[in-house]
């Protein structure tokens, strides 16, 4: 059932899921489908977490916050853990473009075309290209993670910053990876994308989340929104419920879809964990965040086709640190053409979302006046960047808004507005949480690998299986 805001919850559950990001929703749906009594709690007024959207001008404009692209594996994941209808709405983005001082290329982002470009445009020997892809394909979660991305590229493409830019830049935007992160964080994600290209959900995030909500309710998952959990309840060394609005709601297991550090240090409290585990948790680094500029066109206004995902930069070489600079020189344009993106709507308008990676602290330290000035600067620079593709775009825009890490923090409760969860070490803490605190599980954007739409959904499935194993052994 769908609880109203003022409804009191008067029963116990097998599992309580805190947070309705894709990981939390997927886990809840799997366990609900398997007959478990599941309660899904969300602090916001809609489901989805960072997979969200917003309306402007009396719903004449719809903006997808994070629906930019994910690997083909999302089709299988949605078919297996959600529904055929949802899976069938996932379509390929066939025109990904790179425009920067080092090259200007178009690709469908498949392994075959990427290999061809590396060989023909960058003049990399075919055997080197094949060896690189083979090396990536052999990576797994249990590999030694000491090799960094920088060392990986130096091994196969020494001295080729242009090649590194071609291979690394889209993944940096996808999950915040840098050259100093473990190579496994790049290799697994890149290999997923390189399977068959980049995909998106046709219909928009609002339609997707509505379908997921229907599926959850059909599988008897109870949902309550605008419900921010006070504490995770610990009894006899086990997680046995949550405190919501000062009231205890009991459960056999708890799954947190919140930040791993917040879950352990704040929602539970470090006094309930061994000192060594607390220290490991405190050492987990947050990944970078992002800024967006949302642009909606006037009614009837159109633009020439410029591609669906356009990676642009004015910086002369690839430099991950420059991708995070508040004075942005690189940005990605996601273009939502109405007929392709929202064919169900006859009056849908062109929407363009510009995304840039950034540092939370660069925005947090600003005074209110400085903050607004930086947002205006970001908007102006974004429009200038877009004018290179659509010279008259300024006259066609009706809605222009900007979001920063502080916006992300406000609406998603992500620590420091992190768009990409934690660095690699967060995965180990997350996966071992239930071994340290029985009954308490975590699923969310951790370890870079489990970020993004596909990573989050799959991690939700992994943790659902772990919870069901735990429920099956309780009392044995």
Image: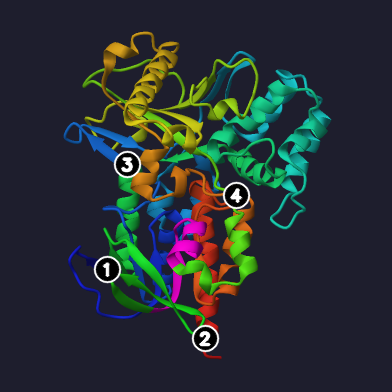
Neighbor class of circle 1 (other Cα within 10 Å; few <14, some 14-19, many 20+) is few
How far apart are the alpha carbons under marks 2 and 3? Answer: 40 Å
Query: Residue 384 placed where, x, y %?
Result: 41, 13
N-terminal of the two: label 2 or label 3?
3
For label 2, the SS is loop
* Residue that label 1 marks: 245
Sequence-first disc among 2 and 4: 4
Residue that carries the numbered disc 3 in the rendered image: 53
How far apart are labels 3 and 1 at the CA level?
Answer: 27 Å
Give the spatial CA distance, label 2 vs label 4.
Answer: 30 Å
- The residue lying toward the viewer, choosing from 198 and 63, is 63
Q: Earlier in the sequence, mark 1 or mark 2?
A: 1
- Residue 50 % position (x, y): 40, 46
Q: Which residue is mark 2?
A: 474
Q: Is residue 256 magenta?
A: yes
Q: Residues within 10 Å of mark 3 (few under 14, many from 20)?
A: some
> What's the CA distance linking mark 1 and mark 2?
28 Å
Of the two numbered discs 3 and 4 on the same chain, state the one appearing first in sequence.
Answer: 3
**Which residue is identified by label 4?**
449
């Amino acid at each position: 059932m769908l609880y109203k805001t003022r409804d009191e919850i008067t029963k116990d559950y097998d599992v309580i899921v805190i947070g309705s990001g894709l990981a939390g929703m997927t886990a809840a749906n799997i366990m609900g489908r398997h007959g478990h009594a599941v309660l899904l709690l969300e602090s916001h007024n809609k489901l989805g977490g960072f997979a969200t959207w917003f309306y402007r001008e009396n719903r004449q404009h719809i903006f997808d916050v994070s629906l930019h692209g994910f690997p083909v594996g999302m089709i299988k994941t949605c078919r297996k853990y959600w529904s055929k209808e949802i899976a069938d709405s996932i379509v390929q983005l066939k025109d990904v473009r790179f425009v920067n001082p080092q090259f200007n290329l178009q690709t469908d982002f498949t392994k075959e075309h990427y290999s061809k470009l590396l060989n023909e445009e960058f003049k990399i020997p075919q055997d080197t290209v094949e060896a690189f892809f083979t090396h990536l394909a052999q990576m797994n979660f249990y590999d030694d993670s000491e090799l960094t991305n920088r060392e990986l590229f130096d091994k196969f493409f020494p001295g080729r910053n242009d090649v590194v830019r071609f291979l690394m830049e889209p993944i940096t935007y996808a999950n915040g990876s840098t050259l100093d992160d473990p190579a496994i964080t790049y290799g697994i994600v890149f290999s997923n994308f390189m399977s068959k290209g980049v995909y998106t959900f046709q219909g928009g995030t609002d339609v997707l989340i509505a379908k997921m909500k229907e599926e959850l309710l059909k599988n008897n998952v109870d949902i309550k929104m605008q419900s921010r959990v006070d504490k995770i309840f610990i009894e006899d060394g086990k997680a046995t419920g949550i405190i919501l609005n000062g009231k205890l709601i009991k459960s056999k297991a708890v799954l947190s879809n919140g930040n791993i550090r917040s879950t352990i240090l704040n929602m539970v409290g470090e006094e309930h964990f061994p000192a060594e585990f607390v220290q490991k948790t405190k050492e987990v680094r947050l990944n970078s965040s992002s800024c967006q500029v949302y642009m909606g066109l006037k009614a009837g206004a159109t633009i020439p086709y410029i591609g669906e995902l356009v990676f642009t930069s004015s910086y002369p070489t690839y430099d991950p640190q420059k991708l995070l600079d508040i004075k942005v020189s690189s940005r990605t344009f996601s273009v939502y053409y109405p007929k392709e993106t929202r064919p169900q709507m006859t009056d849908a308008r062109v929407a363009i979302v510009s995304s840039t990676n950034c540092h939370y602290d660069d925005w947090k330290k600003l005074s209110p006046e400085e903050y607004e000035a930086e947002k205006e600067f970001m908007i102006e620079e974004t429009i200038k960047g877009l004018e290179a593709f659509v010279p008259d775009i300024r006259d066609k825009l009706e809605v222009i808004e900007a979001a920063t890490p502080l916006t992300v923090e406000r609406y998603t409760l992500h620590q420091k507005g992190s768009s990409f969860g934690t660095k690699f070490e967060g995965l180990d803490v997350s996966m071992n949480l239930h071994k340290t605190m029985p009954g308490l599980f975590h699923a969310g954007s951790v370890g870079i690998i489990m970020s993004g739409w596909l990573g989050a959904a799959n991690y939700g499935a992994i943790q659902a299986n772990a919870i069901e194993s735990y429920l099956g052994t309780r009392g044995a």
